[in-house]
Image (tube, helix red, strand yellow):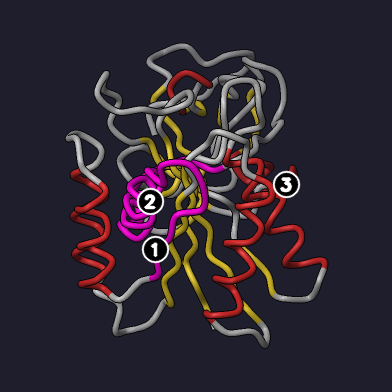
Amino acid sequence: MKYLVAVDDTDMPGTSGTGKLVQELCGILQDTGWGVSSPVSRHQLYVHDAIPFTSHNSAMCVQVDLFDAGKEDLVAYLGGFLEKQAAHGSDPGLCVAELGSELDRSLLIEFGIKAKSEIVFKADAYNIAEKTGIHLSEHGGTGLGVIGAVAGMGLCLAGNDGRYRGWYDFGKAGDVVPAGLLKTLGFDGQIITVAGDVLDPGEPLMIASEKTKAVRKNGRPVILARDCNGVGGKGQARYRTLTSQEAKTY
């Protein structure tokens, strides 16, 4: 069975972030034979003085494909893991949904989009959980992380929000390589322009930053390419990857 898992607010200043914790959890699920997971996506939520958050107010989401266990087993394990591993003083929230035709994605997506530009509340998150039948639970502190967990799930389901944990080393800034070479350097996905056009494998592509991030487009990781605007690096190129700063907007 396929499940979507979203987590928020497991960290405190000076501790490892929620993304790292979720990545560790994915490794445990695989190593113990429970199942496999997708890359972890990060979704930026509204930053406002009235909203408590540790650093950037972002939620993490991942798809988990279980081999034998069911939703109740997964929820119990995840909840226990968060209660043991989340930083003392944090407010962890957990959201789990079975990915099937009965899931009302529209309500979750609407909530996620709203949480990017407005203040939303715990009661709003639980209302969405009740209407959609997803699991939502608190695992420490005030439990305010349930808000980000529901929002992160909605944004992940929207398919065109967020960036993925980790980064790729495709060369030095200014290097120009064929777009298809990126697949041999660890990235197994498409390289597309910001307009949505897939780059030909032979298209020259300038590497804008030594750390290149994948972003979420059409429900999958992609490397985005922008127009070079006449600056082609060490070789002639029409397109370039995103800079580290540009990737932060996703």
Residue 186 is tagged as: 3
* Horizontal arrangement in the rendering, residue 167 relative to residue 148 (left or right): right
* Residue at far bottom of view: 68
Circle 3 SS class = loop
Report if the CB atoms under discs 2 and 1 are less than 8 Å apart.
yes
The answer to whether residue 31 is above or below residue 55 is: below
For the residues bearing labels 2 and 3, Cβ distance under 8 angstroms: no
Q: Residue at x 38, y 57 (%)?
A: 153
User: Whole-Å distance between the Cαs marked 2 and 1?
Assistant: 7 Å
Dividing the picture into quadrants, the one containing residue 53 is top left
**Magenta stretch holds residue 143:** yes
Q: Position of residue 13 (x, y in %)?
A: 58, 21
Which mark is drawn over residue 136?
A: 1
Q: Nearer the viewer, residue 99 or 175?
A: 99
**Of tags 1 and 3, which is closer to the observer?**
1
State the quadrant of the C terminus. top left
Q: Earlier in the sequence, mark 1 or mark 3?
A: 1
**Disc 3 residue type (three-letter):** Gly
Instruction: Measuring from the top left, give residue 175's x and y in whole percent.
Output: 66, 20
What is the three-letter code of the residue carrying label 1?
Leu
The residue sitting at 20% across, 42% down in the picture is 120
Q: Relative to residue 68, is residue 143 depicted above or below?
A: above
Figure quadrant of the N terminus? bottom right
Q: Secondary structure at mark 1?
A: strand
Label 2 belongs to which residue? 146
Q: Report whether 26 appears left or right of 250.
A: right
Q: Which residues are magenta?
A: 135-164
For the residue marked with disc 2, what is the amino acid? Val
Q: Residue at x 64, y 20 (%)?
A: 14
Q: Is residue 188 magenta?
A: no
Q: Earlier in the sequence, mark 2 or mark 3?
A: 2
